[in-house]
Amino acid sequence: MQRKEKGITLGILSIAIISMAIILILALMKIYLSNQIYHESKQINHLEAEVAALKEEHNILQMNVEQLKYKNQITDTIFSMEENKEITDAAEEKEPND
């Protein structure tokens, strides 16, 4: 009669070690990928904040340009009106009175 071995055999021990190694590798891969995703999302959030700030700055600059255009048009109109008035006044002074 053969005697059955009791306890942990070499085969069971090797399967347990291989299983633990696979689980450890998968866990480390998950941690690495989670870390990479976290850092990428931080960088994306930073870039999105910069984009939002630049868009707001662009809007402010656009408003300043529009204000300067309006001011320039008004100033040109007033300057033209004053210039026309000076020309008219000068012409009236040169005309002989009847």
Image (spheres, rainbow, N blue to C red):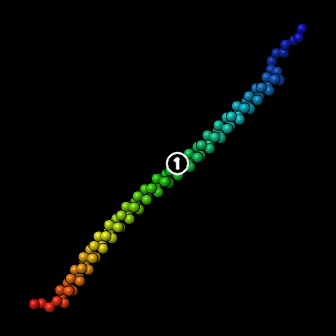
Residue placed most toward the observer, 58 or 12:
58
Q: Residue furthest right?
A: 1
Looking at the figure, which quarter contains the N terminus? top right
**Height in image: 4 above or below 9?**
above
For residue 29, side relative to residue 93 (left or right): right
Image position of 76 (left or right of 89): right
User: Is residue 71 positioned above or below 85 on the image?
Assistant: above
The residue type indicated by label 1 comes to Asn
Image-quadrant location for residue 7: top right
Q: Position of residue 3 (x, y in %)?
A: 87, 12
Task: Residue at 54% x, 48% y: name it.
Answer: 44
At 46% from the left edge and 53% from the top edge, which residue is drawn? 52
Q: Quadrant of the C terminus?
A: bottom left
Can you give x and y, in whole percent of width and height, for residue 36 in the image? 62, 44
Horizontal side of residue 48 vs 36, given as left or right: left
Name the residue nearer the viewer: 97 or 2. 97
Residue 34 image position (x, y, % from top left): 61, 40
State the residue position of label 1. Answer: 45
Question: Which residue appears at 20% of the width and 84% of the height?
Answer: 89
Of 86 and 13, which appears nearest the observer? 86
* Residue 24 drawn at (x, y percent): 71, 33
Q: Quadrant of residue 62?
A: bottom left
Residue 97 located left or right of residue 68: left
Circle 1 SS class: helix
User: Crowding at label 1, few (<14), some or many (≥20) Cα neighbours within 10 Å?
Assistant: few
